Image (cartoon, rainbow, N blue to C red):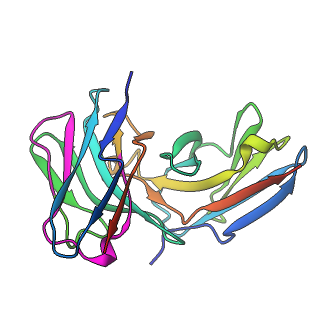
């Protein structure tokens, strides 16, 4: 049972480049989330989805876009990367009955 | 405005002793609280939780206490072991009011160091 899988694990981008982070879960969870973790800041919610085809903004959505075309996948996009987006990104999913969130292993992104 | 606060960035405890991690919250609507443990280069993993209708929940060496009037919860680890060294995040959600889909609100974390 893979749980929540994030791709890639590491990435270095130049300022202005774009990229997409992929999150896949095999637990048939309805809810999916993207968080970022920065030193001294804890985990902050970027965007989330309560079902296929739906997305919503979290606490820090600026500079990111998301899509949930399939129930098991949640994509996080950076259209024009900035150094301030250097962070560790975590995807999580929650079953409809909640509330325990299952996390992926994280993606370490560096924007230079 | 930070709704979930962990005011101790780090805590050092001797092996075998009790570790007490604290968490405060400001949103009185929160009705479910969770603790997550995180090792370096790994995602957070669920440790223990408590509903707002309870004031204590135990799971082996881990006990979470909730004081609703003070908007405070704490995680007790007894006895502390070297493998407990990690960052611990407190999280809260509005489970029973139907807001659980909005996700968990996390504190900034406390780095627990267990010394031999």
Q: Position of residue A37 (x, y in %)?
A: 44, 62
The image shows residue A93, relative to residue A56, as above or below, that is: above
Residue occupying image coordinates x 86% and y 40%: B79
Q: Is residue A29 left or right of residue A54?
A: right
> Residue A53 appears in which quarter of the rendering?
top left
Q: Is residue A98 left or right of residue B6?
A: left
Residue occupying image coordinates x 39% and y 37%: A98
Q: Is residue B92 left or right of residue A66?
A: right
The image shows residue A19, relative to residue A24, as above or below, that is: below
Asked if residue B34 is among those painted magenta in the image, a careful observer would answer no
Residue occupying image coordinates x 14% and y 44%: A68
> Residue B11 appears in which quarter of the rendering?
bottom right
- Please report the bounds of the magenta region as a residue range: A66-91
- Between B116 and B77, which is closer to the camera in this rendering? B116
Residue occupying image coordinates x 57% and y 56%: B90
The image shows residue A94, relative to residue A77, as above or below, that is: above
Asked if residue A85 is among those painted magenta in the image, a careful observer would answer yes
- Between A111 and A89, which is closer to the camera in this rendering? A111
The image shows residue B114, relative to residue A79, as above or below, that is: above
Q: Is residue B37 left or right of residue A77?
A: right
**Residue at far top of view:** A1
Q: Quadrant of the N terminus of chain B?
A: bottom left
Q: Position of residue B51 (x, y in %)?
A: 55, 43
Q: Position of residue B92 (x, y in %)?
A: 49, 54
């Amino acid at each position: 049972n893979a749980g929540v899988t994030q791709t890639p694990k590491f990435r270095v981008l130049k300022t202005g480049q774009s990229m997409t982070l992929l999150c896949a879960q095999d637990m048939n969870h309805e809810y999916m989330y993207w968080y970022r973790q920065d030193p001294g800041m804890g985990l902050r919610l970027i965007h989330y989805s309560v079902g296929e085809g739906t997305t919503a903004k979290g606490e820090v959505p600026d500079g990111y876009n998301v899509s949930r075309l399939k129930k098991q996948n949640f994509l996080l996009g950076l259209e024009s990367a900035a150094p301030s987006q250097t962070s560790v990104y975590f995807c999580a999913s929650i079953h409809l009955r909640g509330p325990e969130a299952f996390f992926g292993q994280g993606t370490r992104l560096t924007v230079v | 405005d930070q709704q979930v606060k962990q005011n101790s960035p780090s805590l050092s405890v001797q092996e075998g002793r009790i570790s007490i991690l604290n968490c405060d919250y400001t949103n009185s609507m929160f009705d479910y609280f969770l603790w997550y443990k995180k090792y370096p280069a790994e995602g957070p993993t669920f440790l223990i939780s408590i509903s707002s209708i309870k004031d204590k929940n135990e799971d082996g060496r881990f006990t979470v206490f909730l004081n609703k009037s003070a908007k405070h919860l704490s995680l007790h680890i007894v006895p502390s072991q070297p493998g407990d060294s990690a960052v611990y995040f407190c999280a809260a959600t509005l489970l029973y009011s139907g807001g659980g889909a909005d996700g968990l609100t996390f504190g900034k974390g406390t780095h627990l160091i267990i010394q031999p």
